């Protein structure tokens, strides 16, 4: 695992060099879904602090076994009836894909007098199989969600299509970056737009070149699932 992490970091640095970016501006999230706690601990010992999970139950199971400075990110579709289980165990919910879900997050966060940090998931490639707002719906949804006092919208997330050649996803990353910049320029209150979560094992270099600030790498760190 040590070699794999070093390789991913070297590839992030190379992508940054190509696009005049600072590697410090990119957070590598180790996507540990389906992997046992021992593997998360091994990654922790190698310096990883950010972990991505796509199932509520896995976060609930793993959270108590990890050191306190370990940060869990919810990256999978979140059912409204499970929001209360992850709110206090995650630093960021990347996958807010409906107004309905945001409403539930507001309700649960309000009960706890807590501010939930979230990203809006955008279905940039308009895939039927994926969740998320279409590009053209996102700003309107954001304007509604920023009115919720217990939610802080930090940015946008997308899951690009599963393709052979990562270059095919460049257009979706460009589209999301453009939307991110557009929204940022409008200075919408409580919609700070400082996080752009895009890129996975197969396409993170292209995502970094196009402006990602968080990349989510599973297979590239932990091996195949
Ligand atoms: C599984 C998953 C990843 C990581 O995928 P890899 O191809 O293994 O790097 C990233 N983001 C989301 C939302 C995922 O569900």
Image (tube, grey):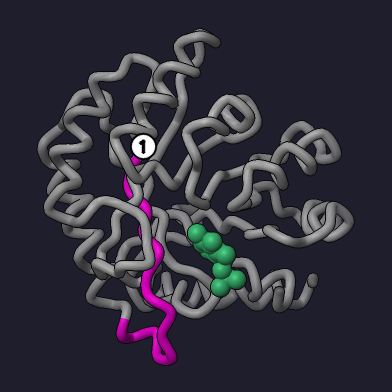
Q: Quadrant of residue 17?
A: bottom left
Q: Residue furthest bottom?
A: 164
Please state the total of marks drawn on the protein image. Answer: 1
Residue occupying image coordinates x 70% and y 43%? 57
Q: Relative to 33, does residue 115 appear above or below in the rendering?
A: above
**13 or 171, nearer to the observer:** 171
Query: Does residue 35 appear to the left or right of 15 in the view shown?
Result: right
Residue occupying image coordinates x 32% and y 78%? 169
Could you say where residue 69 lies in the image, as x and y percent from the top left? 72, 35
Could you say where residue 73 lies in the image, as x and y percent from the top left? 57, 44
Residue occupying image coordinates x 19% and y 65%? 175
Q: Relative to 215, does residue 12 appear above or below in the rendering?
A: below
| Quarter of the displayed picture in which ligand 1 can be seen | bottom right
Read off the magenta span. Answer: 155-168
**202 or 55, nearer to the observer:** 55
Say what secondary structure mark 1 lies in.
Answer: strand
Query: Does residue 181 appear to the left or right of 10 in the view shown?
Result: left
Give the class, few, some or many, for how many residues have Cα within 10 Å of label 1's Cα (few <14, many ≥20). Answer: many
Could you say where residue 166 lies in the image, as x and y percent from the top left? 39, 84
Do we see residue 216 in this rendering? no
Could you say where residue 178 lies in the image, as x and y percent from the top left? 17, 59
Residue occupying image coordinates x 22% and y 36%? 142
Q: Quadrant of the N terminus?
A: bottom right
Q: Quadrant of residue 39?
A: bottom right
Do we see residue 31 in this rendering? yes
Q: Quadrant of the C terminus?
A: bottom right
Q: Is mark 1 within 8 Å of ligand 1?
A: no
Q: Which residue is mark 1?
A: 154
Q: Relative to 97, does residue 102 appear above or below in the rendering?
A: above
Q: Is residue 5 magenta?
A: no
């Amino acid at each position: 695992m040590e070699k794999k992490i070093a390789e991913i970091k070297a590839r992030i640095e190379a992508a940054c060099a190509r696009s005049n970016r600072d590697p410090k501006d990119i957070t590598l999230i180790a996507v540990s879904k389906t992997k046992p706690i021992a593997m998360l601990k091994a990654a922790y010992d190698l310096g990883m602090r950010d972990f991505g999970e796509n199932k509520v139950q896995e976060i609930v199971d793993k959270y108590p076994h990890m050191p306190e400075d370990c940060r869990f990110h919810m990256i999978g579709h979140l059912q409204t009836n499970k929001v209360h289980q992850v709110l206090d165990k995650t630093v960021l919910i990347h996958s807010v894909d409906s107004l309905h879900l945001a409403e539930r997050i507001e309700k649960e966060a309000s009960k706890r007098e807590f501010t939930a940090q979230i990203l809006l998931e955008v279905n940039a490639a308009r895939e039927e199989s994926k969740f998320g707002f279409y590009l053209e719906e996102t700003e309107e949804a954001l304007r509604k969600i920023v009115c919720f006092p217990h939610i802080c919208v930090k940015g946008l997330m997308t899951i690009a299509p599963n393709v052979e050649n990562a270059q095919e996803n460049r257009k979706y990353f460009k589209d999301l970056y453009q939307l991110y910049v557009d929204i940022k320029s409008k200075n919408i209150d409580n919609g700070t737009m400082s996080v752009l979560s895009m890129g996975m094992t197969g396409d993170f270099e292209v995502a970094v070149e196009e402006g990602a600030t968080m990349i989510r790498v599973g297979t590239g760190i932990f091996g195949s699932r």
